Amino acid sequence: MSNTPIKTFNVREIREQFPALRQQIYGKNLIYFDNGATSQKPQVVLDAINKFYSKENANIHRGVHYMSQKATTEYEESRKKIQRYINARKSEEIIFTKGTTDGINLVAHSYGELLKPGDEIMISAMEHHSNIVPWQMLCMRKGLTLRVVPINERGELLMDTFEQMLSKKTKLVAITHISNTLGTINPVKDIIVKAHAVGAKVLIDGAQSIQHIKIDVKDLDCDFYVFSSHKVFGPTGIGVLYGKEQLLDSMPPYQGGGDMISKVTFERTTYNELPFKFEAGTPHVAGGICLGKAFDFLDSIDLKAAEEHERFLAKYAEDTLDTFEGVKIIGEAKNKTSVVSFSVKGIHPFDIGTLLDKQGIAVRTGHHCTQPLMDFFKILGTVRASFAFYNTKQEIDTFVEAFEKSLNMLK
Ligand SMILES: *Cc1c(COP(=O)(O)O)cnc(C)c1O
């Protein structure tokens, strides 16, 4: 930020800013280990939501009156904040969406319109359903081929195979930066260089990376980067698609309606310029403004220290759980963070999740929207503990005790 405040990382101070973490569930202090599904919100975001709807609520980009102009300014300021945070060249490259899923669907439709039968889309074996299904639907519509880069037993991409699969036919590589199920951090920079060498564009699914590692889209040189606000300490219902300006300019609009037009007649409509061309209808105004507050909050934190803390938590949890008989860690990539997924021999993940819940511990159980990945590991699902920087070693110790207790009850 402009006046370069000193950034610190103190877990106790950070926790104080998250009221949701200070509650009891079934009489036990909440331990929130479901950050992969959604993050809790800091006080600055909660205050901003309240303030917007109490005093500032107005539609944007259309009113002459004071409130509308103020809301418009704040919404556009937020766009600029996000641009600076991810180091995009221009704020026109920041498109507000409903979230990661919406951003991927936008690209699948609009960039997809530029593709021809026989062209190929490449994804990986560890994608979230929202980075699989839109591409399958596009391939059906346009006669394209969907190709899937395989992984090894540790949950790492087979990079040699990836390189062999690339060809002039590859038009887009759509890949997750960090796997929501395995915690694997994919070598996206390398992937981008190799994909660009054959003329393919690259979409990075950043739903699990924006909240854990510093993102610089210029340095990555990705063509698209998508994420959801709700996983990065902002409200639900809003997200971001970053795209390179030239590419976005070359793409037709996704949805038609208000705000995305320049001039409308019954014969012909011309479209608005970026970013509005891709933002039809009244957007989530409060969401956009409050997502900006979430980035203000992140800007106040020493993110390097936060990242190290999260890596430590994941490693500590993994090493501790690994000592239990019958526990199998799913996802043992060399480069991983923030997520520990595991299965227990002879016990259904749901049963463990239910018993942990009764002890105030929130984890996720199931396939985590990655069914093909479950098929690969030949399991029905996992128990997943996913961490944010506000989690502590103490919480992991309590979680492990509760897990042991649950095991004894189920055996
Ligand atoms: C959560 C998630 C998504 C989908 O995000 P939504 O907020 O549900 O649109 C996509 N990819 C990954 C890796 C995710 O973790």
Image: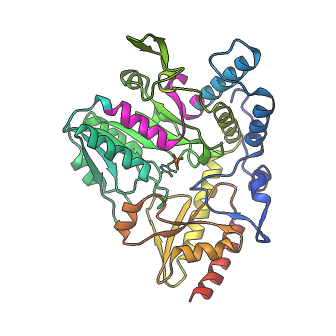
Can residue 221 be seen? Answer: no
Q: Is residue 350 visible?
A: yes
Quick one: which residue is furthest to the front in this view? 266
Judged left or right of residue 410, residue 126 is: left
> Height in image: 198 above or below 124?
above
In depth, the one of 201 and 109 nearer the eye is 109
Q: Give whichever of 236, 198 is nearer the camera.
A: 236
- In the visual, does 168 lie left or right of 364? left
Q: How is the image coloured?
A: rainbow
Query: Residue drawn 54% across and 61% down?
Result: 339
Question: Which residue occupies 66% across, 69% down?
Answer: 396
Magenta region includes residue 68: no
Q: Is residue 198 above or below residue 375?
A: above
Residue at (36, 61) in percent of width and height: 372
x, y (%) of residue 93? Answer: 49, 26
* Residue 99, x across and y down, in percent: 53, 41
Image quadrant where one finds the C terminus: bottom right
Q: Quadrant of the N terminus?
A: top right
Q: Magenta stretch: give its range.
A: 83-112
User: Which one is in front, 405 or 355?
Assistant: 355
Count every numbered label the image shows and give the total. 0
Q: Main secondary structure of the magenta part?
A: helix
Q: Is residue 57 left or right of residue 39?
A: right
- Compared to residue 112, the image places residue 307 above or below, namely below
Q: Position of residue 19 (x, y in %)?
A: 78, 53
Q: Position of residue 410 (x, y in %)?
A: 58, 86
